[in-house]
Image (spheres, rainbow, N blue to C red):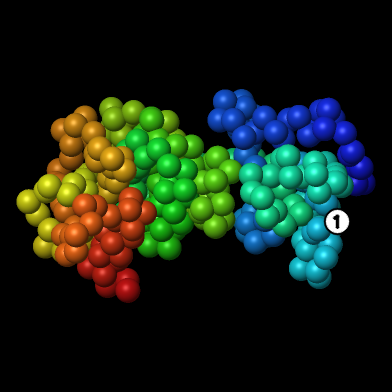
Amino acid sequence: MVKKVVSETNAWIKWAKKLHYKRYRLQGDVFLVEGIRTVETALDAKAQLEAAYYSARLLENERGKSLLKRIKTASTNVMTVTDKLLGEISDTQTFQGIVVVAKKPRVQMDSSVMNGLPLVVVDRIKDPGNVGTIVRTADAGGAEAVIFLKGSADPFSPKAVRGSMGSVFHIPIMTEYNVECLEKFVKEAGYMIITGDSKAQHYYYHTDLSKNIALVIGNEAHGVSSEVKDISDKEVCIPIVGKSESLNAGVACGVLLFEAARQRSLV
């Protein structure tokens, strides 16, 4: 049954607003998903929906109407709200009339279930847009999983989820790792740690990336931390041809991942 909510003091509305903050997402192990395409992806992945909020804008086309039918089947907490209220929940100015609260996908990763595909490690990248792009790129590039070290932006923030274009539902994501846990995990799985560094002596295309590797993508301004460099097996660089000082973190991730795929004859 659809509930009609008209007040911003409603408990469901107040809860959704809180999920813009990481601590509340962590408390409930949930996150916000908005937009027709991303919500469709969540449903295709059989994500657990804790709540759904929609406005009349969703019903302006047949795709939106079809999505609402699926949402009503997937969640018992479906609310119709005004555009004004949905705008307060949404993270975008041009929202599409739908925001849902989804449970974070459960991830159980150990060496026994891994397929030897590359791991992507995110080291203190602060921009949620970059984080979302990296998740999307890791998904497209055939990575095994994405590991976020402490100090990185939350991949389940609204902006990062949007940037991932739904890939948060396709690829395992592990967060809040420290360097010691990272080293233990990858070494037990038989992986080499490959660090991207603009000052490295080895070009990425002269490096064997066909083995079990964990590719570390560092902070936008400061690169990979010294702690991670200390445990890395090799540092590689992507040569810059023009006058730019560096590549965007998501672009660098794509270059390295697709070179690894090329060496494995996957592309």
Q: Looking at the figure, which quarter contains the C terminus? A: bottom left
Q: On the rendered structure, is 216 left or right of 56?
A: left
In the foreground, 99 or 189 = 99
Q: Where is residue 265 in the image (x, y as percent from the top left)?
A: 27, 72
Residue marked by disc 1: 56
Relative to 26, residue 133 above or below: below
Q: On the rendered structure, is 160 left or right of 178?
A: right
**Residue at position x 16%, y 53% from top?**
237
Amino acid type shown at disc 1:
Ala
**Residue at position x 47%, y 48% from top?**
129
**Residue at position x 11%, y 48% from top?**
200
Relative to 245, residue 121 above or below: above
SS category of the residue bearing label 1: helix
Based on the displayed image, in which of its 4 quarters is residue 45 positioned? bottom right
In the foreground, 240 or 31 = 240
Based on the displayed image, in which of its 4 quarters is residue 118 positioned? bottom left
**Residue at position x 63%, y 57% from top?**
38
Q: Where is residue 121 in the image (x, y as percent from the top left)?
A: 33, 44
Residue farthest to the left, as pictured: 201
Q: Position of residue 122 (x, y in %)?
A: 35, 42
